[in-house]
């Protein structure tokens, strides 16, 4: 449930925080909160799935979404690429709603394309720590049993053995491996070889439910093996709106008008 931070003085003013909270979350307010079916608070007018959240990018078209060095990716280009990959995940690889899609790469722009393609395809996105060793990757892969691995070239050799053993599909981003032993016997496609996305093409016709699993995020494993923490679409959609609530509450706490 949204909450406000203490005032800058460090002396909590619970009465003021409660008034700000009530102002922002009352019926008809920008962050109106209602109790869901399970008795937990939800944003009344916010997106209820990550697919609803990402579909709003249609409205931003040519506005820059990501900048990486000399490269700029617009919202329209991003959504077209994510939609095209989502269609491929379902139609070429035969993945179905609820199947897991692992993402193992550094912070390339394609990380966002891979994550949101999984959501548009109705899959459960499983981002893995790019710093992990092969043993750590194998532990998580055995645990979540993904149907596809969306990886960059730096991670490929750490997951190739598992993919070869299980027959999982691999989509390789930023990979310069040839046809040597690393890719031998893998069901591997190179992202750079895919056709250019059609900017008018739609994502797959799937509609995840708010209660469906959206992500599995692995813990740090400080007291043992990392464990997969599952979050639903509704939980992640609410988490995406929480920073906006916090910013509005902070502005009101300073006596300013929220943007």
Image (tube, helix red, strand yellow):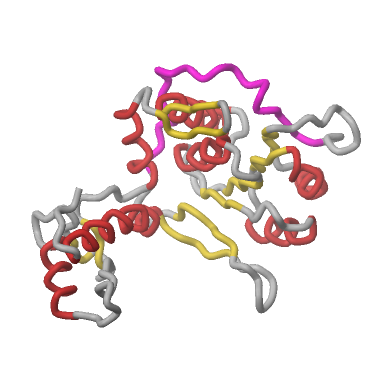
Instruction: Decide which of 87, 95 is in the foreground and name it.
Output: 87
Name the residue rendered at 52%, 42% in the picture: 115
Residue 48: percent from left, percent from top: 30, 50
Q: Is residue 40 magenta?
A: no
Q: Is residue 188 magenta?
A: yes
Instruction: Decide which of 119, 178 is in the foreground and name it.
Output: 178
Residue interval drawn in magenta: 186-207
Instruction: Decide which of 68, 47 is in the foreground and name it.
Output: 68
On the image, which quarter does residue 22 sit in?
bottom left
Instruction: Decide which of 107, 45 is in the foreground and name it.
Output: 107
Indicate the quadrant containing the N terminus: top left, top right, bottom left or bottom right: bottom left
Name the residue rendered at 63%, 54% in the picture: 128
Answer yes or no: is residue 34 visible. Answer: no
- Tally of numbered tags: 0
Residue 76: percent from left, percent from top: 41, 25
The correct choice, above or below, for 90 with respect to 6 in the image is above
Residue 195: percent from left, percent from top: 59, 17
The correct choice, above or below, for 59 with respect to 159 in the image is above
Name the residue rendered at 70%, 37% in the picture: 170
Answer yes or no: is residue 61 visible. Answer: yes
The correct choice, above or below, for 77 with respect to 112 in the image is above
Q: Is residue 95 left or right of residue 256?
A: right
On the image, which quarter does residue 57 sit in?
top left
Residue 225: percent from left, percent from top: 69, 71
**For the view shown, which residue lies furthest in the front direction?**
9
Name the residue rendered at 61%, 46% in the picture: 103
Prevailing secondary structure of the magenta residues? loop
């Amino acid at each position: 449930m949204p909450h406000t931070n203490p005032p800058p003085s460090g002396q909590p003013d619970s009465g003021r925080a409660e008034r700000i909270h009530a102002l922002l979350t009352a019926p008809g307010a920008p962050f109106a909160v209602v109790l869901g079916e399970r008795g937990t608070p939800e944003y009344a007018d916010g997106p209820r799935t990550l697919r609803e959240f990402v579909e709003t990018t249609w409205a931003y078209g040519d506005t820059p979404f990501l900048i990486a060095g000399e490269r700029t990716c617009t919202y329209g280009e991003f959504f077209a690429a994510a939609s095209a990959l989502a269609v491929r995940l379902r139609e070429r690889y035969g993945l179905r709603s609820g199947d897991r899609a692992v993402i193992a790469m550094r912070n390339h722009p394609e990380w966002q394309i891979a994550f949101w393609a999984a959501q548009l395809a109705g899959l459960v996105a499983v981002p893995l720590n790019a710093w992990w060793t092969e043993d750590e990757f194998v532990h998580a892969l055995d645990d979540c049993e993904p149907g596809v691995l969306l990886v960059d070239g730096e991670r490929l050799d750490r997951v190739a053995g598992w993919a070869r053993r299980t027959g999982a599909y691999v989509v390789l981003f930023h990979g310069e491996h040839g046809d040597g032993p690393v890719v031998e016997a893998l069901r591997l496609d190179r992202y750079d070889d895919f056709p250019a996305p059609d900017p008018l093409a739609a994502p797959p016709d799937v509609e995840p439910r708010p209660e469906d699993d959206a992500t599995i995020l692995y813990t740090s494993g400080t007291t043992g093996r990392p464990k997969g923490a599952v979050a639903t679409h509704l939980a992640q959609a609410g988490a995406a709106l929480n920073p906006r609530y916090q910013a509005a509450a902070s502005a009101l706490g300073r006596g300013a008008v929220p943007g």
